[in-house]
Image (cartoon, grey):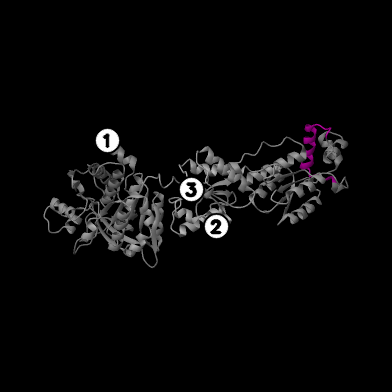
Amino acid sequence: MTITEIARLAGVSVSTVSKIVNRKDDSISAETRERVLAIVKEYNYRPYANAASPTGRSGIIGVLTQERLGMLVQGIVSKATKLGYATAIRTYTDSEDARRQLSSLLELRIDGVIVDGACGYPDLIKALESATVPHLFFNTKEDRADANLDYELLGFRTTQELALRGHERIACMLGTGARVHGFFEGYRRCLFESGIPFDDELVFESSAGLPIEKVASHSFSGIVVSHFYDALRLYSAATELHYGVPFDFSIVSLRDDERQAPFPPISAIEIPRLSYGSHLADLLISVIEKTEPPTPFETAARLSSAASVDVPYTSRARHIVVVGSINTDNYLTLDVLPHPGATATTSSSQTFPGGKCLNEAIGVARLGHEAVAIGRVGDDADADHILRSLADDGVDTTGIARTQDKRTGQAFIFVPKDGESTITIMTGANDILSAQDVRACERAFAHASHCLVNTEVPLDAVRETLLLARKHGLLTIMKPSAVNTLPDDLMGKIDIMVPNEAELDALSPHDKSIDTKMRTLVEKGVGAIVVTLGAQGCKVLSHDTSKRIPAADLTAVDSTGAGDAFIAALASYLIRGYDLEQSARIATYAAGLSVTRQGASAALVDRPTLETYVHAVEPGLL
């Protein structure tokens, strides 16, 4: 393609084309310039390739940066290619290297250059102005910068994610580089606009170390971090010391958009470097071609996820700690249960996550409360399934430990037509739960209100649970399953015991009536007894209450999880301020709804379903 052919296609003179490609086009209209340049780019016309003036356009833009393959560079290259330009990229290590790399770009007779302002900024400006090459700088604090990301906005939005959640002690950790100044100013502006006092004791430089000791002293409830790598370091150091994120403190960080799906999941405001690079190319080429510049770049500031942010622990609704057995429930549905000398057959079997710890924790979560589960699982696929199930219901599983060379506990559940199941348990990893395991989770007790514990784990773990609950002022609810006796010294540490009739008989075998058995346990120090009686409802006995509560009028399909549903609801409504009798009435309905479906955890009721049913059958209860 010759200059004459370009002129013919554009409908102008050869002289006009020559002026435009040689940047001597001040007297030519913008419309004509744009038409000619469009044809020049479409046909890849290069004047110097045909011995034209060496000052003609090369169709190349330069990029001088510290990163060669990042998303910003990809954005520049993609937009430049779309607009008909090739891209020459040079990287540098220091200011002197930046000057050398710029010289190599100028030797290519580039049409313009995009420069990372972190290099030798003033010297490069002089060199570019002397060469009369269109240029723009980014990533610099200097006023001369042509197009910067709005790091002040990013810092503001990062801090705002915590301020909007009620945090009033917000720390700031700063790395190095051009983003830091703007990020810090955004942090301070957000504090000011949110009415939060600035405290320079809560500003940390990452080079000086991580502020772990400030976590221990609760100096802050949330922290914003300018660099994602530092946020990862802080998260890792905190979890090694058994701090929970966001339970003990929240983290929000900036993150370059090339860091996809990071693990662990840290909430981040993404730096839109791909679209920003595209904007830089668009802006430079508009200068080169003397066209209207693109609209100013708007820095997006969206939170990637809420994985590491929560309200401050001091204002969070107090949660429930659940300690006990975790199993895989294996169901066999039979016409009749097997008996000695006979064989029972079935064509129906199902498997569900189960165990009293799991069921009660999920039950609590579905009724609208935070739950922390403490227990042990094996080193097997059943454990994977169990942990996923708990996570799906929002249960905190940091207190659940895997056990090498042990199988996850197994429950074998036989369900006849009348729904009254029979259960056999292979304890597996549940047998390994120790007092030390529970003690390692003491932080979960520190901010909790209630503790649910069952006795399908070793007594030492149960004892430690009750001791920690008493130390931190938690109300304790015990399910005395699979035991024939409990030491008298533990009785005074149990606020509410919830046995079924068989369990009550085992704990008080010498008394004849249910009422006498209940009174015996209260006399030994238990605060209150609620005995679940299946289709007969339940009985409540405390120092000031004695009440019989009828069961819900519902058809039983599987009674396996009724007791767990009852306890989860009992605790949930005690937290909401209902008294023991009212909570037991609501819990009776929760248990009744749970037996209408098969599977203990699968049948646990959620709050809207339960309260809709209660409003329908006993309107004045809620």
Contact check, label 1 and label 3, Cβ < 8 Å: no
SS label for mark 2: loop
Q: Residue at x 27, y 35 (%)?
A: 616
Q: Is residue 38 magenta?
A: yes
Q: Residue at x 66, y 53 (%)?
A: 69
Magenta range: 26-47
Q: Name the foreground residue: 115 vs 552.
A: 115
Foreground mark, 2 or 1, reads 2
Mark 2 vs mark 3, foreground winner is: 2
Lower position in the chain sequence, tag 2 or tag 1: 2
Q: Residues within 10 Å of mark 1 (few under 14, many from 20)?
A: few
Question: Would residue 556 be seen by someone viewing this image from the given angle?
Answer: yes
Residue type at tag 1: Ala
Q: Is residue 398 left or right of residue 115?
A: left
Image coordinates for residue 324, horizontal then vertical, percent: 31, 57
Above or below, comparing residue 398 to residue 34 in the picture: below
x and y percentages locating residue 256 in the rendered image: 59, 49
Split into 4 quadrants, where in the image is the C terminus?
A: top left
Q: Secondary structure at mark 1?
A: helix
Q: Which residue is mark 3?
A: 222
Which residue was labeled with disc 2?
209
Q: Position of residue 357 (x, y in %)?
A: 32, 55
The amino acid type found where label 2 is placed reads: Gly
Q: Is residue 202 above or below residue 21?
A: below
Q: Residues within 10 Å of mark 2 (few under 14, many from 20)?
A: few
Q: Look at the numbered discs 2 and 3 and tell me whether their residues touch, using CB distance below 8 Å.
A: no
For label 1, the residue is 616
Q: CA distance from mark 2 to mark 1?
A: 59 Å
Q: CA distance from mark 1 to mark 3?
A: 43 Å
